[in-house]
């Protein structure tokens, strides 16, 4: 870094953005989609519309059926988790953790019969949500990779603010008829400045929510590695009890569920049963967090043998823990209503556009003269730009398309959908290496538009409960298809612009773009 402080910040902004830009684009796209994670999961399991929801006193009987299934199919599991039925997910969602080295188990049950629900196997919106902060890598490495990229993103945002001389004037400036470099620069400035508070908030809170994962040394030193004790004292969880080694029968969970529902007014979200079959078995009822920014969930812990209430957690967090739950709530946006969630989503879209235009600007600023050939590094960056900015939306569309086209009874169906996602992304990333840059952009954008249209067609043709096929169908399918049609139109328009674009003739009076502005 040489020159003035502002020039040094421009250098830092340019290279920090390029190094992690492709990863950050994937993080922003999947994170933005995760604001509608529940809706995506419902859309990817259309059979849920046929399952009748249970509520009130029926939840106790449903919990008994779940435990009966777990006793038969996972008697030696360390922990049982029972996701209770809710209006948008009216099935029992069972998950159990086995001994180290053994894969966990997962099944969906009909809450009225206790039999496996006739619902297709899919990761749903959870795949996009987990990819957002784990990149489909092992949890430790994925979270660290995203954490490093998040810190660099924060550096890029702050250095971009320092570099930008006309941050308020450029808020109202977009010259789409100018040279491509100027148009992309204006788009980068507008999308960056318009949602700047959101970009700063989402980047900072994204890192803070995993602070104890990235910096565990204080907890390790103070609690000698007993992280569960730390979380219990902070008020996030109930106190864990180690097994006694003495066998004992698990008490019926139905009465426990009934007592929990009578104690806490919020909706019962999950049961966690630890040390089942042991004299120190524990049943924890976890409720949906009250509507608000703070992301904290009321909990009641029962003795799994006697049924006595051991502990009640219903607010009252310590200041530091309360601060972290507020940060988590801000990042996930679960407190937001329909309008605010849409605003968060649109700000996320602007974040995607800011990153995309930023990494394209790097290659535009280094285009060789007409008589020169692009050097290998520039050609590679150009191909990676197409592979990330176009390839990821194409992969998401293929993921949705696979959900509708793969046989419902296919073994390992959820894994096949994820494999289709990555295969599509790899193809979209490799093809630009063999195509001229402009043609690669045009073909890629057009392909994404066609894939979005294919998702809509497949949804209408394969979903019996679609509103276009049956009166009174779930309106979710219509809203989802409308969103896909809007995306198809957006990508088709972008492809048309690339095909018809002609660089304007440069006048002698035109002033050159300042080098430092290319990284604003």
Image (cartoon, helix red, strand yellow):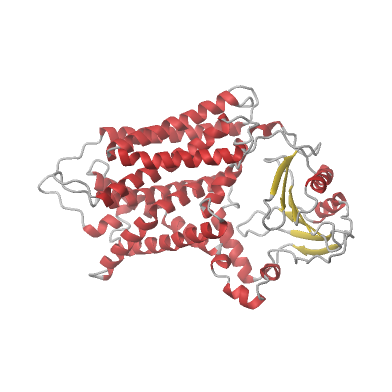
* Count of numbered marks: 0
In this rendered view, identify the residue nearer to me: 163 or 215: 215
Nearer to me, 139 or 156: 139
The residue lying at 37 percent from left, 55 percent from top is 193
Q: Is residue 169 left or right of residue 76?
A: left
Report if residue 390 is visible in the image: no
Residue placed farthest to the left in the image? 508
The residue lying at 41 percent from left, 62 percent from top is 152
Quarter placement of the N terminus: bottom left
Residue situated in front as seen by the camera: 229 or 511: 229
Residue at position x 83%, y 42% in the image: 58
Residue furthest to the bottom: 222
Q: Is residue 445 left or right of residue 294?
A: left
Is 225 left or right of 67, judged from the image as shown? left
At which x and y percent is residue 372?
16, 46
x then y, percent, for residue 94? 73, 46
User: Is 319 located above or below residue 46 in the figure?
Assistant: below
State the quadrant of the C terminus: bottom left
- 177, above or below 283, in the image: above
Residue 437 at x, y = what percent? 28, 40
- Asked whether residue 85 is in view, the answer is yes
Specify the quadrant of the image occupied by residue 47. top right
Residue 49 position (above or below residue 334) = above
Residue name at image x 24 percent, y 52 percent: 365
- Camera-nearest residue between 259 and 20: 20
List x then y, in percent, for residue 318. Answer: 66, 71
């Amino acid at each position: 870094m040489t020159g003035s402080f502002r020039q040094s910040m421009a250098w830092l902004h340019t290279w920090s953005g390029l190094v992690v830009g492709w990863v950050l684009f994937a993080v922003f796209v999947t994170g933005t989609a995760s604001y509608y994670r529940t809706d995506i999961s419902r859309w990817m399991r259309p059979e849920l519309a046929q399952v009748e929801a249970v509520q009130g006193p029926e939840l106790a009987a449903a919990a008994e059926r779940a435990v009966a299934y777990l006793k038969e199919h996972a008697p030696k599991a360390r922990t049982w988790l029972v996701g209770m039925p809710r209006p948008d997910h009216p099935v029992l969602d069972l998950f159990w953790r086995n001994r180290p080295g053994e894969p966990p188990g997962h099944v969906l049950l009909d809450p009225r019969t206790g039999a496996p629900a006739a619902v297709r196997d899919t990761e749903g919106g959870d795949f996009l949500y987990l990819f957002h902060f784990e990149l489909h890598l092992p949890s430790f490495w994925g979270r660290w990779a995203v954490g490093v990229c998040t810190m660099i993103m924060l550096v890029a945002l702050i250095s971009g603010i320092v570099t930008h001389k006309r941050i308020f004037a450029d808020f109202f400036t977009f010259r789409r008829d100018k040279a491509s470099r100027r148009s992309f620069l204006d788009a980068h400035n507008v999308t960056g400045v318009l949602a700047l508070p959101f970009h700063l908030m989402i980047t900072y809170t994204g890192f803070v929510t995993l602070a104890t994962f990235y910096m565990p040394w204080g907890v390790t030193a103070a609690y000698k590695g007993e992280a569960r004790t730390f979380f219990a004292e902070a008020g996030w969880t109930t106190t864990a009890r180690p097994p006694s080694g003495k066998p004992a029968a698990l008490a019926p969970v139905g009465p426990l569920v009934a007592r929990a529902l009578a104690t806490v007014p919020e909706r019962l979200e999950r049961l966690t049963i630890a040390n089942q079959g042991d004299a120190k078995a524990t049943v924890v009822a976890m409720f949906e967090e009250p509507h608000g920014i703070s992301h904290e969930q009321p909990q009641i812990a029962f003795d799994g043998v006697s049924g006595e209430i051991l502990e009640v957690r219903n607010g009252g967090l310590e200041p530091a823990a309360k601060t972290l739950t507020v940060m988590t709530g801000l990042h996930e946006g679960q407190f937001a209503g329909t309008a605010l969630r849409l605003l968060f989503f649109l700000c996320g879209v602007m974040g995607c556009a800011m990153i995309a235009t930023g990494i394209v600007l790097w290659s535009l600023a280094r285009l060789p003269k007409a008589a020169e050939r692009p050097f290998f590094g520039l050609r590679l960056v150009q191909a990676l730009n197409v592979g990330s900015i176009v390839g990821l939306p194409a992969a998401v569309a293929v993921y949705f398309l696979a959900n509708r086209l793969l046989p419902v009874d296919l073994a390992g169906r959820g894994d096949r959908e994820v494999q289709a996602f990555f295969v599509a992304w790899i193809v979209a990333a490799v093809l630009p290496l063999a195509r001229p840059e402009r043609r690669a952009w045009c073909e890629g954008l057009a392909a994404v538009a066609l894939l979005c249209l294919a998702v809509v067609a497949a949804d209408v043709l394969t979903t019996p409960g679609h509103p276009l096929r049956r009166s009174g169908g779930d309106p979710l399918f219509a809203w989802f298809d409308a969103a896909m049609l809007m995306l198809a139109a957006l990508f088709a328009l972008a492809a048309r612009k690339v095909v018809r674009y002609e660089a304007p003739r440069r006048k002698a009076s035109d002033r050159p773009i300042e080098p430092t502005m290319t990284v604003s």
